[in-house]
């Protein structure tokens, strides 16, 4: 087991990483929540099928309530959020109750927003079950989607702890492994050239990644996430650098239809585009062809899906949370490990998308 302490302005909390770590949750609840009244587990249909019984076994003395959301981004609608709040009210949760988020990034975002807004805020714990959630479960961004933009309705609300049980990621299909590993690659690019080199040299087939390689990569990614979150909890400065690839990536996700293209796979296309812009606009000297060859070997798509309209993608990017006054801002790299935030003219984006 590895323990990583996350330090933000509002809260410090532990992230526990290891196989079978879920067995420690009951003890944590007893020690940290005297007078605990009720537990609400928020999960989704897929995670419930594969893993819910495993969690219920370690929580049997608590008799938790379970809310099951649709899988994927369909969990992050206002209707599902309202249903979860209604279940909490119907079961008389109070300020001594705790929400357990049990699933991937979408469940974590939904659960955190439910906890942040129920009775103006009750505690919650993240129990991620995907590789992607090594990023989303840490840092306190919680939200639901709006048809006009991803994560537009939400809050900054930190969990009490994160229990990252690596046994639970072993059932993931390959497209979910790719989705999560894109964020690992992102963390390396924005913060750690040596880690990036290690990934290129050692990770060649995501179907064959070893448990140690995965554990080491996820722990490294969480520590990099903490580095930015500890400096800038509410994304007024350097935390925005964690959005490398997300400006175009979120636009692709939205235009494809949430759930039809995984978050990480869309972000990978966005990262390639941001690296291309970086070579042209911020002085980056980066072998983009070599990078594309590597990620294609890992199974990623590397171009914008042909059916998408550039005009609609640009409109989506104008609604990105980094944009100011309809001016699109991208996270770019001056060099690997040295990100910047830069305004990019719409004409330049058109030009580069056409070339892309």
Image (cartoon, grey):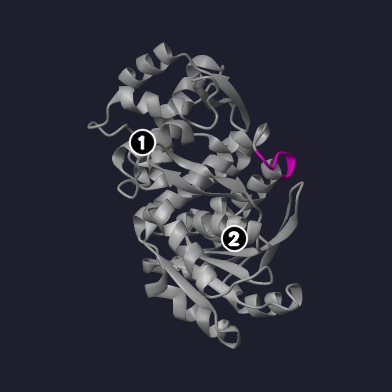
Q: What is the crowding at mark 2: few (fewer than 14 residues within 10 Å), some, or many (at least 20)?
A: some
Task: Say the numbered circle drawn on residue 252.
Answer: 1
310 on left or right of 161: left
Q: How far apart are marks 2 and 1 (CA)?
A: 32 Å
Residue 75 lies, in percent from the top left, at 41, 57
Q: Nearer the viewer, residue 88 or 349?
A: 88
Q: Is the magenta stretch mostly helix, strand or loop?
A: loop
> Residue 200 versus residue 36: which sits nearer the camera?
36
Rendered view: 45 above or below 318: below
Q: Residue at x 47, y 59 (%)?
A: 107
Q: Does the magenta stretch include residue 75?
A: no
- Where does the image place residue 167, in percent across and percent down from the top left? 50, 71
Q: Of label 2 and label 1, which has the lower sequence position?
A: 2
Q: In this view, does 342 lie to the left or right of 180?
A: right
Name the mark nearer the viewer: 2 or 1.
2
Secondary structure category for the residue under label 1: helix
Q: Residue at x 46, y 70 (%)?
A: 67
Secondary structure found at label 2:
helix
Q: Nearer the viewer, residue 65 or 59?
A: 65
Q: Quadrant of the C terminus?
A: top left
Q: How many marks?
A: 2
Q: Is residue 59 above or below residue 325?
A: below
Which of the labelled discs sits on residue 118, or is there none?
A: 2
Compared across the picture, whether 113 is left or right of 173 comes to right
* Image spot of residue 334 (x, y percent): 60, 23
* Res 73 seen here: yes
- In the image, residue 19 lies at what x, y percent? 57, 72
Residue furthest out toward the left: 307
Q: What stretch is highlighted in magenta?
A: 230-234
The answer to whether residue 48 is above or below residue 107 is below
Residue at the (63%, 61%) spot, across then down = 119
Quadrant of the frame with the N terminus: bottom right
């Amino acid at each position: 087991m590895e323990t990583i302490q996350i330090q933000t302005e509002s809260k410090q909390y532990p992230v526990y990483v290891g196989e079978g770590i879920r067995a420690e949750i009951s003890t944590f609840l007893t020690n940290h929540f005297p007078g605990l009244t009720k537990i609400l587990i928020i999960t989704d249909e897929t995670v419930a099928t594969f893993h819910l019984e495993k969690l219920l076994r370690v929580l049997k003395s608590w008799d938790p309530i379970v809310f099951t959301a649709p899988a994927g981004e369909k969990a992050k609608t206002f209707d599902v959020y309202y249903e979860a709040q209604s279940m909490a009210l119907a079961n008389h949760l109070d300020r001594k109750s705790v929400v357990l988020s049990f699933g991937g990034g979408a469940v974590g975002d939904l659960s955190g927003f439910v906890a942040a807004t129920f009775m103006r805020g009750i505690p919650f714990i993240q129990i991620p079950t995907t590789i992607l959630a090594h990023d989303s479960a840490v840092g306190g961004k919680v939200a639901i989607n709006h048809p006009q933009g991803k994560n537009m309705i939400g809050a900054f609300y930190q969990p009490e702890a994160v229990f990252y049980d690596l046994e639970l990621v072993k059932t993931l299909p390959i497209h979910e492994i790719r989705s999560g590993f894109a964020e690992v690659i992102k963390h390396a690019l924005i913060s750690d050239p040596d880690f990036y080199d290690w990934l290129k040299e050692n990770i060649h087939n995501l179907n064959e990644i070893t448990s140690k390689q995965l554990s080491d990569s996820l722990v490294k990614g969480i520590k990099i996430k903490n580095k930015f979150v500890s400096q800038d909890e509410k994304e007024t400065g350097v935390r925005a650098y964690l959005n490398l690839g997300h400006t175009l990536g979120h636009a692709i996700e939205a235009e494809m239809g949430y759930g039809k293209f995984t978050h990480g796979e869309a972000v990978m296309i966005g990262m390639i585009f941001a690296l291309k812009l970086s070579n042209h606009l911020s002085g980056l000297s980066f072998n983009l062809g070599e990078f594309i060859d590597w990620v294609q070997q890992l199974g990623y798509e590397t171009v914008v899906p042909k059916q998408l309209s550039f005009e609609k993608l640009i409109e989506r990017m104008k609604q990105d949370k980094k944009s100011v006054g309809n001016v699109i801002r991208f996270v770019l790299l001056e060099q690997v490990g040295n990100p910047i935030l830069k305004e990019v003219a719409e004409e330049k984006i058109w030009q580069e998308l056409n070339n892309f």
